[in-house]
Amino acid sequence: MNQRINIERIEHWIGGATAPATSDRFGEVTNPATGEVIRHVALASTDDVACAVAAAKAAFPAWRGTPPLKRARVMMRYRELLEAQREAIVKLISQEHGKTLDDARGEVTRGIEVVEFAIGIPQLLKGEIAPQVGTGVDSYSIHQPVGVCAGITPFNFPSMVPLWMFPMAIACGNTFVLKPSEKVPSAALLLARLAKEAGLPDGVLNVVNGDKTAVDALLTHPDVGAVSFVGSTPIAQYIYTTAAAHGKRVQALGGAKNHGVVMPDADLDFTVDALIGAAYGSAGERCMAISVAVAVGDVADTLVERLAKAARGLPVGDGTDPAAQMGPLISRVHCDKVRGFVDAGEGEGAKLVVDGRGLQVAGRENGFFIGPCLFDNVTPEMTIYRNEIFGPVLAVVRVPTLEAAIALINRNPYANGTAVFTTSGASARRFEDEIEVGMVGINVPIPVPVSYFSFGGWRNSLFGDQHIYGPESVRFYTRSKVVTRRWSEGRAAGAPSLVMPTLGQ
């Protein structure tokens, strides 16, 4: 009991103010670099969620009626505040997630870019008009907000993924309830406080911390009209089926097993640097991480040798250490899970070229660290190939041709992102045309689209019809309405007609 009193407690944000939980349930927030519990976070009850949804519903009519230009001006001020408070957000991310400060800065930047896109909402909400579709008849389309929207976000990007969701939803005229990961709650609450400071009316953005209880309450609440999710594939499937069964529109982004194809003509110095960053950045805890290097032809031996040398020399440590390039994993449970995958890879016959399981970080012996791991001679039947490990494990698969590489990737149940490394325009063009994956990089290892395109995968990496942020988010967070208009002034009344109207004749 004394520990709970002495440790900071994170509550909810409802109606523009801190809202104490109605439940006494709480979770532990841990610094992954030290293993220490640094905060407690309130876990929402269904009553807490209902309170947040009610606040969002009450704020919706006035916010819906706010001109898009005024909403854009709030986003302008919000962007300025995010820039001013960037380092405070970065510190919270590194403290609760463990990623390096530079990596956290990159995360915040990618989130701010979506806010910048949202500033253009007056242009993005413009409809179309077709005058004189019939005699004296005009048709036009308008885009109107959905209502109360909800976002459920993962631990690996405490600020970026929330910023992928609520700025676009709010700019479109909706109100929002955010349920961040209970492992990393602090950054999301700071984002909400800054939004209020930017002029966002109370109740437009709410934050409820919690676990499955909070998630299920959002998925089934009759006043929630749309749900956005980023996380693992099994949970994405659950989110999609549950929310859709309750009449909601859903975008649920799932897991990944991203492949980086290395052609024999690739610039190996550049390629190795790119693969190291894509595989081990953020300790591999990215849905866009490259976890499979597909070596084509005779490039494999040299590629593995160079990857091994680079992986062995990668500095691992506390994310706040300027010398560290890779930090810890999110939790001891997840660290043990990743070690289990490495064990399985060895047991199934893959060649473990670099083994990071024994890594010790001086002064951080209780942290959740595992060093870079590199496997060679991996086959598609192996556990380490079939599963999303979400850790610093890179598997090399050898194939004879580009055709075989494309076929391998297209057979994989995941289809989030992929990349090819080559100096051949013909190979690159064939790859981008034939590959069945949502985001493709040509000599770009992590092809996360800029904010004015949209982010999303295919197959088991996405459940729903719309990708996240960018133009597709405008379509997701609005409903289209088509109006056909005619005025009757000066027209003589005629006999009623019961036939199907045909205007364009």
Image (cartoon, rainbow, N blue to C red):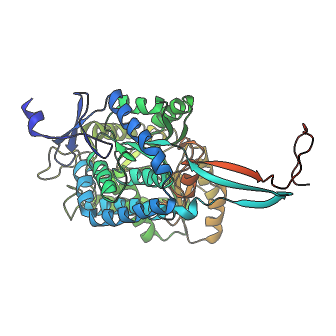
Residue 132, image quadrant: bottom right
In the figure, is residue 144 to the left or right of 134?
left
Pick the front one: 26 or 74: 74
Pick the front one: 435 or 67: 67
- Give coordinates of residue 304: x percent, y percent: 42, 58
Pick the front one: 275 or 436: 436
- Give coordinates of residue 164: x percent, y percent: 44, 53
Q: Is residue 256 visible?
A: no
At x 24%, y 48%, the residue is: 96
Q: Is residue 407 visible?
A: yes
Residue 215, image quadrant: top left
In the image, residue 178 sits, relative to residue 312, either above or below, namely above
Quadrant containing the N terminus is: top left
- Give coordinates of residue 43: x percent, y percent: 28, 33
At x 68%, y 54%, the residue is: 141
Quadrant containing the C terminus is: bottom right
In the image, residue 123 sits, relative to residue 334, either above or below, namely below
Furthest residue to the left? Answer: 2
- Give coordinates of residue 448: x percent, y percent: 48, 59
Pick the front one: 358 or 99: 99
In the figure, is residue 481 to the left or right of 416?
right
**What is the number of callouts on the image?**
0
At x 17%, y 52%, the residue is: 361
At x 38%, y 31%, the residue is: 50
